[in-house]
Amino acid sequence: MKPVIGVTTYGRHEQSMKSTHYDSFYVLPADYALSVRRAGGIPLYLPPGEDLFPAVLDRLDGIVFSGGADIDPARYGGDTAHPALTDLDPERDAAELIGIRAALERADMPILCICRGFQLLNVALGGALVEHVPDLGKGDMHRDEDGLWALHEAEIEAPDSKLAGIIGAPRSSGTSGHHQALKTVAEPLTVTARAPDGVVEAVEHVSHPWCLGVQWHPEVTAGEDPAQQRLFDVLVRQAAGNEAFARGDRTG
């Protein structure tokens, strides 16, 4: 049996879609499903709803908390009136905070957190976010001039980390499109990579057997970049119970 990997979707109003019949959708880019499938897993999309977790975890072998819109700053004591905030989705915030806390209680549940999911992990554990990266006064290398994808490197600071073992190099080159970042890193997390401007790019949970978070979007380039695909490969093989991959080994 292939491992079933849950992947959280956007909230119902995060993405506008053309339809003459419907005005709200639970959607997610296909790259997430393709990355899980290449790794040998079965992707199962999880639309937000407060009743979704934690019961659904019993039916999953692993989970990906995906990217998307901003988390409500009220969740971390931030500036709820910041002009750069995207549209917020209270339903998604509520569901995913319940979900990630429930997943962290499961030692048998490998967790990969991507972009918004990375920030969600930090907020769920008591950390805070920078509402808008340009406010740091170091430019905005994490998006292009149109606010879209940018490709940049992240320096891996922890050579003994799972991330280092997976990437297999001192730096990771990933696709980025975020305008927020970690401000206060939650105590149960350890920083494993940073961007050249100092923004935290990756964390790992210090006590959960396999919980990794990356600020970039590995699914975007995973089809062409084996290092990014390995994040999904290791997640799926850990979900399947492969102890070597649980340690982050680079074989296979």
Image: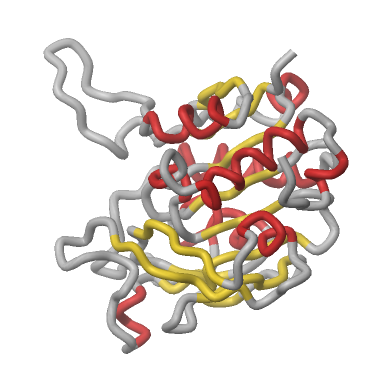
Q: Quadrant of the N terminus?
A: top right
Is residue 214 or residue 100 the one in the foreground?
214
**Going by the image, does 242 lie left or right of 129?**
right
In which image quadrant can residue 81 be found?
Answer: bottom left
Residue displayed at 68% across by 64% down: 164
> Which residue extends farthest front?
251
**Going by the image, does 58 lie left or right of 226?**
right
Is residue 21 or residue 30 the one in the foreground?
30
Above/below status of 52 relative to 98: above
Q: How is the image coloured?
A: secondary structure
The answer to whether residue 206 is visible is yes
Residue displayed at 43% across by 59% down: 174
Number of callouts: 0
Q: Position of residue 120 (x, y in %)?
A: 56, 54
Residue displayed at 32% across by 89% down: 137
Q: Position of residue 126 (x, y in %)?
A: 66, 65
Q: Position of residue 188 (x, y in %)?
A: 76, 66
Above/below status of 157 relative to 69: below
> Which residue extends farthest bottom?
137
Residue displayed at 37% across by 49% down: 69
The answer to whether residue 77 is visible is no
Q: Position of residue 8 (x, y in %)?
A: 52, 34
Above/below status of 41 relative to 198: above
In which image quadrant can residue 191 be found?
Answer: bottom right
**Going by the image, does 226 lie left or right of 147?**
right
Q: Quadrant of the C terminus?
A: top right
**Going by the image, does 207 lie left or right of 115?**
right
In which image quadrant can residue 235 be found?
Answer: top right
